[in-house]
Image (cartoon, rainbow, N blue to C red):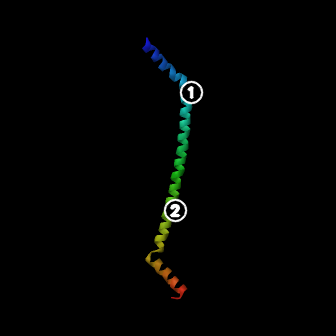
Amino acid sequence: MIQQRRDATVEARPDADEPDDRRQIAALEKRVEELEALLEAFQDSVHRETTRQRNELAALAKKIEAPEMARALGRYSQKRGL
């Protein structure tokens, strides 16, 4: 008889807590959506920064290439009268 009462209590309980559970699930789903939006924004930011740095490095690499360096040194020496 005690076992029957426990089973009835366990079965009755989910129905009583269902609206609260639904609110908690809805709140968690909303939070997950917010976190997904933040993660997407972070990924976009990382991509933009990576692209910017890659372009900056490519520009620096081009500046130190031999032909470009020779032209820059030639301009520098003409400007300084060397």
Categorize mark 2 by other alpha carbons within 10 Å: few (<14), some (14-19), many (20+): few
| Mark 2, residue position | 52
Write the residue at 44% across / 75% down: 65
Q: Are marks 1 and 2 in contact (CB under 8 Å)?
A: no
Q: On the picture, is 1 further left or further right than 21? A: left
| Residue 19: image tag | 1
Q: Residue furthest front?
A: 2
14 lies above or below 33? above
Q: Amino acid at mark 2?
A: Arg
Q: Element under label 2?
A: helix
Percent of width and height locating residue 56: 50, 66
Q: Residue at x 47, y 20 (%)?
A: 10
Mark 1 is surrounded, within 10 Å at the Cα level, by few (under 14), some (14 to 19) or many (20 or more) other residues, namely few
Q: Give the SS element for disc 1.
A: helix
Residue 13 on image: x %, y %: 51, 21
Q: Is residue 1 above or below residue 81?
A: above
Percent position of residue 59, x then y: 49, 69
Q: Nearer the viewer, residue 62 or 23?
A: 23
Q: Residue furthest top?
A: 1
Q: Looking at the rendering, which quadrant does residue 2 occupy?
A: top left
Q: Residue at x 53, y 29 (%)?
A: 21
Q: Is residue 48 above or below residue 8?
A: below
Could you tell me which residue is drawn at 56 percent across and 27 percent down?
19
N-terminal of the two: label 1 or label 2? 1
Question: Tag 1: residue type?
Answer: Pro
Image location (x, y in percent) of residue 82: 50, 88
